[in-house]
């Protein structure tokens, strides 16, 4: 007997005939099984409960508790209910196969024993038990993995929620800062117009009146800009829509206001992070607003594309253009730069007077 044959399974044999008990014990022990033997049903129940075996060979006809009754009690006990039971019965004895299987037996062996049959039936049931135990273990691991996955998904959902909340706060702070900058500039210009009107009030009423009209126009434009900015703060950028649909709404509004229909080329994956979607939308929103207000463009092109290295955005017009180095704080350029920088992206703005403007932004596919 070699080491590979050792400890192949723990078998409990229950038979009131000592010759049968010794015979089975000897042949199974020689095959590497650990074998215990008892001569009655009561001892079988106690032994199986104290140290549950991997398999029970159970004689049918015994004094006291017979094999059927012992099997019923084994199956009624949660501690022993999973142990497979093979019934032992002589060819000359009455053996009710239907009853044997109905009380929980899985197989039967007839006496006198045929060694090959005994080994085959025993190993079949032990292999089946090992497979069930492995399956139960795998199921337990899968259930544990599922719980861990659900926990990780919940943590990811909470993290994404916090990131979205932080992104929203940063967006509101950025817009509020833009309001402060633009409002301060407008109020300074408004104050200059009013001071000029007061200075000329008694000397040149017509000029004073013209300054007042300019001040009124500045006030109206400032109020409109503040209202638009406050609306931006209050609203969600995409309002639950896809990025492509949100961009379509922007271009439709731009077309309605200017009569110019932007040419769009959009090819992006649908699962971009919300932070990138928001940044792209805001950059296009600010860029189209600037074109509408200042550029006097007759053609506008938008290109948005996912690549292996990230997401590329381009907004280009053929309008008046401007000196970029002289307008680092105007036209929402600082807000664009902050949005791109926050996502570890790159922003390039190319413009000269009378040559239009090109805004190009690149974002990594996964924002850090």
Image: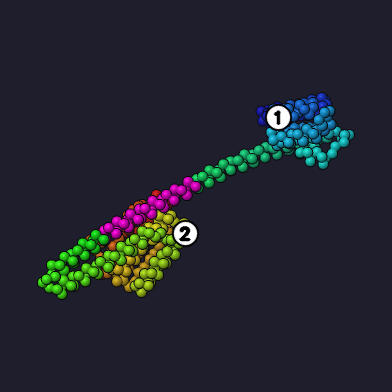
What residue is at 79 percent from the left and 34 percent from the top? 69
Task: Name the mark on residue 270.
Answer: 2
* The residue positioned farthest toward the left in the image shown: 203
Q: Is residue 149 above or below residue 346?
A: above
Dominant SS of magenta comes to: helix
Question: Does residue 337 belong to the magenta stretch?
Answer: no
Q: Position of residue 31 (x, y in %)?
A: 73, 29
Mark 2 to mark 1 CA distance (whole Å)? 59 Å
Q: Nearer the viewer, residue 193 or 75?
A: 193
The magenta stretch is 154-182
| Number of other residues with Cα within 10 Å of mark 2, as a class: few under 14, some 14 to 19, many 20 or more | few
Q: Residue at x 12, y 73 (%)?
A: 204
Residue at point 39%, 64% (across, down): 303
- Along the line of sight, the residue nearer the viewer: 59 or 31: 59
Query: How many numbered dots are placed on residues in this image?
Result: 2
Q: Position of residue 242 (x, y in %)?
A: 45, 61
Which element is circle 2 on? loop
Q: Earlier in the sequence, mark 2 or mark 1?
A: 1
Secondary structure state at the residue bearing disc 1: helix
- Residue 269 in sight in this render: yes
* Visual colour scheme: rainbow
Residue 302 drawn at (x, y percent): 38, 66
Let me know if residue 31 appears in the view: no
Percent x, y for residue 177?
29, 56
Residue pointed to by mark 1? 49
């Amino acid at each position: 007997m070699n080491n590979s044959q050792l400890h192949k399974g723990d078998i409990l044999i229950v038979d009131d005939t000592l010759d049968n008990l010794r015979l089975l014990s000897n042949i199974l022990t020689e095959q590497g099984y650990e074998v215990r033997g008892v001569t009655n049903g009561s001892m079988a129940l106690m032994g199986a409960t104290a140290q549950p075996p991997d398999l029970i060979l159970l004689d049918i006809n015994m004094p006291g508790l017979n094999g059927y009754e012992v099997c019923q009690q084994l199956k009624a006990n949660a501690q022993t209910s999973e142990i497979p039971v093979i019934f032992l019965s002589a060819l000359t004895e009455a053996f009710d196969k239907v009853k044997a299987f109905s009380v929980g037996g899985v197989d039967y062996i007839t006496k006198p024993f045929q060694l090959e049959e005994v080994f085959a039936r025993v190993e079949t049931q032990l292999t089946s038990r090992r497979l069930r135990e492995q399956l139960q273990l795998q199921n337990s691991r899968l259930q544990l993995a599922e719980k861990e996955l659900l926990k990780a998904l919940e943590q990811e959902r909470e993290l994404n929620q916090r990131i979205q909340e932080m992104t929203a706060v940063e967006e509101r702070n950025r817009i509020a800062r833009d309001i402060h900058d633009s409002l301060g500039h407008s109020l300074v210009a408004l104050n200059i117009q009013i001071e000029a009107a007061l200075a000329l009030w008694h000397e040149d009423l017509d000029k004073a009146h013209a300054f007042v009209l300019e001040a009124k126009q500045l006030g109206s434009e400032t109020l409109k800009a503040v209202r638009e900015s406050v609306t931006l703060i209050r609203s969600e950028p995409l309002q639950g829509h896809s990025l492509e649909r949100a961009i379509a709404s922007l271009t439709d509004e731009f077309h309605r206001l200017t009569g110019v229909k932007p040419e769009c080329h959009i090819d992006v994956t649908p699962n971009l992070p919300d932070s990138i979607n928001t940044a792209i939308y805001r950059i296009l929103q600010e860029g189209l607003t600037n074109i509408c207000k200042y550029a006097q463009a007759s053609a506008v092109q938008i290109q948005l594309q996912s690549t292996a290295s990230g997401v590329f955005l381009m907004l280009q017009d053929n309008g008046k253009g401007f000196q970029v180095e002289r307008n680092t704080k105007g036209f929402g350029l600082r807000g664009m730069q902050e949005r791109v920088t926050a996502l570890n992206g790159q922003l390039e703005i190319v413009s000269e007077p009378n040559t239009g403007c090109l805004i190009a932004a690149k974002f990594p596919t996964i924002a850090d």
